[in-house]
């Protein structure tokens, strides 16, 4: 039996996109907020139980989903009007050609990127780990961008400048990884159909 990372319930995507950001949020919340429910997840207490660790991981996963959704609502439009617009202008002929080929090969009226990615999932699954790595990294850094701003309100003022720099760098990395994902999907699609 060949076990692949995608066969596990918690793959790289879930770990980087949901658990790590949720871990940061639940760790800081349990340290600063005096709420009985959050005391269950305090893993820094003297007597940490197995239940505390389990509750901490489950709550981190749930909070990670909320962070993921909030970040998508706030940062995706910013990405689209800044970084994506700049990259589409730079690679206009390649993107246009790819989208025309995708529309001819896959007569599904949907987003060209999603159609090409679905085609690759079915016909060329060996490229999926590379694509998922870029997608997972983009989601992690998108969440870190917003979490850095959140931590500015919790940590001392001396850390604020550092956190703002981390937030800007995280946004840049998120945008770069998201673009690399799109670009690779198109490249792999062109290779697969030729």
Image: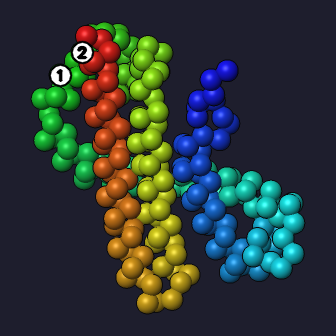
Where is residue 176 drawn, in percent x and y? Answer: 30, 49
Quarter of the image where the C terminus is located: top left
Above-or-below relation of 21 to 11: below
Above-or-below relation of 188 to 24: above
Q: Residues within 10 Å of mark 1 (few under 14, many from 20)?
A: few
Q: Quadrant of residue 131?
A: top left
Q: Residues within 10 Å of mark 2 (few under 14, many from 20)?
A: some
Above-or-below relation of 103 to 177: above
Where is residue 139 drawn, in percent x and y? Answer: 47, 49
Q: Is residue 178 left or right of residue 146?
A: left
Which element carries disc 1, helix, strand or loop?
Answer: helix
The residue wearing badge 1 is 97
Which element carries disc 2, helix, strand or loop?
Answer: helix
The residue wearing badge 2 is 101
Quarter of the image where the N terminus is located: top right
Above-or-below relation of 111 to 57: above
């Amino acid at each position: 039996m060949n076990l692949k990372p995608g066969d596990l319930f918690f793959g790289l995507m879930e770990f980087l996109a949901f658990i790590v950001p949720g871990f940061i949020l639940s760790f800081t919340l349990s340290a600063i907020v005096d709420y009985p429910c959050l005391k269950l997840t305090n893993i820094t207490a003297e007597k940490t139980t197995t239940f505390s660790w389990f509750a901490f991981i489950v709550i981190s996963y749930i909070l990670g989903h909320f962070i993921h959704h909030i970040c998508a609502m706030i940062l995706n439009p910013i990405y689209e009007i800044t970084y994506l617009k700049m990259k589409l202008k730079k690679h206009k002929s390649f993107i246009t050609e790819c989208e025309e080929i995708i529309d001819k090969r896959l007569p599904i009226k949907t987003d060209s990127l999603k159609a090409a990615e679905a085609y690759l999932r079915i016909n060329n699954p060996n490229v999926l780990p590379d694509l998922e790595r870029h997608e997972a990294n983009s989601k992690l850094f998108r969440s870190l961008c917003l979490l850095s701003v959140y931590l500015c309100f919790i940590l001392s003022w001396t850390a604020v400048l550092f956190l703002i720099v981390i937030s800007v760098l995280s946004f840049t990395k998120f945008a770069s990884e998201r673009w690399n994902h799109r670009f690779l999907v198109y490249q792999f699609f062109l290779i697969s159909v030729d």
